[in-house]
Amino acid sequence: EAGVAQSPRYKIIEKRQSVAFWCNPISGHATLYWYQQILGQGPKLLIQFQNNGVVDDSQLPKDRFSAERLKGVDSTLKIQPAKLEDSAVYLCATQAPYSSGYNEQFFGPGTRLTVL
Amino acid sequence: DQQVKQNSPSLSVQEGRISILNCDYTNSMFDYFLWYKKYPAEGPTFLISISSIKDKNEDGRFTVFLNKSAKHLSLHIVPSQPGDSAVYFCAASAGSNTGKLIFGQGTTLQVKP
């Protein structure tokens, strides 16, 4: 079974520029998450999708961050304009439909963003 | 407000000995707890979990203990192996079907040969 794919793996931009990240989930995983992991901290949830609908975006800085999940499969996360404090690893995770017990989230390798 | 805390940024143990990683939480609504392991340049991978209705869950060399009254959980690795060297994250969820995870800051484990 293929894992969660993310691209690009690394991105360096200047502040005020725009950037987009892409995530391809594990086939059949209806739930998709975007996390931000700042150096020395644990991942922090930005947004959760169920199929192509947003379940939770309470932690997403909506003045500069946006995300979409077209057709309930691939997802993109965009930052426009970027700030220095956006430097972090952006992780995508997906989760199988609920059956019984807890279905763990599977993480992609992440995109490391550096804002100069 | 840090709802999940891992107060030890790093831990170093000798190969073959026990590694104990600790985690504290403040939200009494949390009812499911997970440990993830992360190698450099990779995403976190699921290691082991425990429901709040249990106080212990074991999977091979890994055991997680939950003390609800103290709002504390720990991960025991016995025996520790050099390949266990990684960053370990504790995470908590309110509702097994809720999905949203709150992560601790992580503890870097180094297992010396």
Image: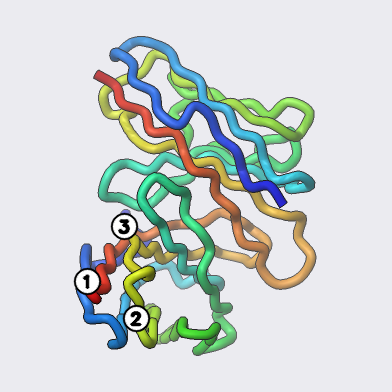
Mark 2 and mark 1 on one chain: yes
Mark whose residue sits in front, 3 or 1: 1
Q: Position of residue B7 (x, y in %)?
A: 23, 67
* Residue A38 sits in quarter: top left
For disc 1, the chain is B
Q: Are marks 2 and 1 in contact (CB under 8 Å)?
A: no
Q: Mark 1 — residue?
A: B11
Looking at the rendered structure, the kind of residue marked 2 is Ser
Spatial CA span between label 3 and label 2: 22 Å
Which quadrant holds the C terminus of chain B? bottom left
User: Which numbered disc, 3 or 1, marks the residue that appears first in the sequence?
Assistant: 1
Mark whose residue sits in front, 3 or 2: 2
* Image side of residue A54 versus residue B35, left or right: right
Q: Can residue A58 be seen in this snapshot?
A: no
Mark 3 and mark 1 on one chain: yes
Mark whose residue sits in front, 2 or 1: 2
* Image side of residue A101 versus residue A39, left or right: right
Q: How many numbered marks are there?
A: 3
Between residues B110 and A100, which one lies in front from this camera angle? B110
Looking at the rendered structure, the kind of residue marked 1 is Leu
User: Which numbered disc, 3 or 2, marks the residue that appears first in the sequence?
Assistant: 2
Looking at the rendered structure, the kind of residue marked 3 is Gln
